Image (tube, helix red, strand yellow):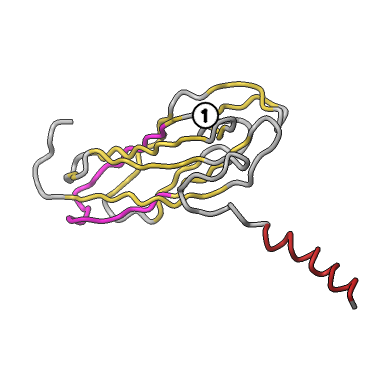
Amino acid sequence: GRVARWALVLFILPLLSYGQGLSSEAGPSSAAQGDVEWRVEEQPTVVRPGERLMVRFQGQVTDGWHTYALNSPAGKPLEITFDSLPPGLTVERPLRQSEPTAQYDPNFKSQARYLNGQFEVRAALTVGAEASLGPDTLRASVRYMVCNDQLCMPPQTASLPVPITIAEGDVRDA
């Protein structure tokens, strides 16, 4: 009776708290866990067919933690994808990023490329003639993992809105 109930509570309690703090929200978490706070900025805010839209993903990593660069040979490299782009919009590859720090990673026992503190990843989108005019909200998925010198948090995905407006008009000079 009583021992079985306690054993059940001790077994289930950790399971209930396992996912705590692993939210897909783009906000900050505690320094004990480490995370990246994300912001998105688009330039220009109104784009015309034939022009490029620059989307800047600005990250702020919790002090004492780092995330892995797009091209890191170790860890879980940063990955940014746009979910179901509408016809007429294409992502130019490769994406551009702030200069990463290259150093040995004790968690993976190999060289890695880190992004820490404030950093930026830029994605250029070309707007084709077949793009629909008017406002729209694209969704970007940012998959990342943060680590410190002793441990790594499970990989997370932040879903970020990218509001755009496509307007009629001649192509403007960049």
Disc 1 secondary structure class: loop
- In this rendering, would 51 be left or right of 26? left
Q: Is residue 154 magenta?
A: no
Q: Nearer the viewer, residue 119 or 121?
A: 119
- In this rendering, would 69 be left or right of 51? right
Q: Residue at x 62, y 36 (%)?
A: 147
Q: Quadrant of residue 113?
A: top right
- In this rendering, would 150 be left or right of 132? right
Q: Residue at x 41, y 32 (%)?
A: 120
- In this rendering, would 115 be left or right of 132? right
Q: Is residue 15 above or below residue 167?
A: below
Q: Is residue 168 above or below residue 51?
A: below
Q: Nearer the viewer, residue 59 or 141?
A: 59
Q: Quadrant of residue 101?
A: top right
Q: Residue at x 68, y 63 (%)?
A: 16
Position in image of residue 119 (x %, y %): 44, 30
Instruction: State the residue position of label 1.
Output: 116
Position in image of residue 151 (x %, y %): 69, 37
Residue bounds of the magenta highlight: 120-140
Q: Nearer the viewer, residue 145 or 73?
A: 145
Which image quarter holds the C terminus? top left
Position in image of residue 81 (x %, y %): 44, 47
